Amino acid sequence: MSNNQIKATSTTDDQGAVSAAIAAIKQKLPFLVDLSIDDRKSMLKIGAKGYSFVKQALDVASQHPGVLPASFDVNEMRNDTQLFAYLTTLQLILNQLKKQIDDTAMQIGSQAYAAARVVYACASSSFAGPPLEVAADQLGKHFGRKPKAAKATAPTAAAPPSATPVSSHA
């Protein structure tokens, strides 16, 4: 685990600028789609080997357009191939950024949770006294614990009177 404590803030202006930058990216990519799970399952997938095949096929199509059906658009294939290359570059950059955001959020969340546990421990200590008793009880609900007063006054359950011991000797 990383011991690097993150000490940072994000101003409202910074948050607005980041949101605006994301909105600008979306505006520059108006053709982005949301596929359903079924759509994703039914589509042909392309990886590094598939991309190599596509590039070779584009070269063949560009050099020999006469062997292709009249309805085949080599320029459309070229555009798709170039756009795919660009989008995969964006994927790499954005996946790295997403991982950093995820990791940073995890670390910041861990730091905040550790700080909250310190507050809870201090609020529920005997040194805190009655002024923090309600706060300690509220914080303790997170852990599924009952307030101290409820534990002390909770009735104990006795065995039902009709229970008779069963002999194991037969």
Image (spheres, rainbow, N blue to C red):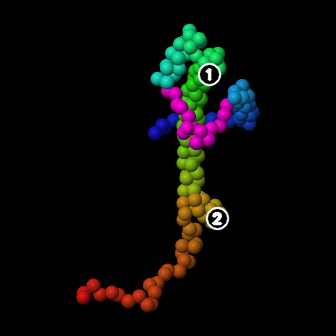
Q: Quadrant of residue 163?
A: bottom left
Residue at x 43%, y 90% (from the top left corner) = 162
Instruction: In the rendered view, tell whether residue 28 sits above or below residue 4.
Output: above
Residue 49 x/y as whole percent: 46, 23
Residue 133 on image: x %, y %: 62, 64
Tell me which residue sits at (46%, 39%) in the image: 1
2 or 1: tag closer to the N-terminus: 1
Q: Is residue 48 above or below residue 5?
A: above
Residue position marked by numbered label 1 in the rendering: 80
Kind of residue indicated by mark 2: Val
Q: Given the image, on which type of amino acid does mark 1 rest? A: Asp
* Front-most of residues 43 and 123: 43
Q: Is residue 63 left or right of residue 2?
A: right
Q: Residues within 10 Å of mark 1 (few under 14, many from 20)?
A: few
Nearest the camera: 53 or 18?
Answer: 53
Q: Residues within 10 Å of mark 2 (few under 14, many from 20)?
A: few
**Secondary structure under badge 2?**
helix
The mark found on residue 56 in the picture is none
Can residue 14 be seen? no
Res 8 quadrant in image = top right
Magenta region includes residue 135: no
Q: Tell me the SS state at disc 1.
A: helix
In the rendered image, the vertical position of residue 56 relative to residue 169, given as above or below: above
Q: Find the magenta span and give its range.
A: 32-47
Relative image position of residue 145 (x, y in whole percent): 54, 65
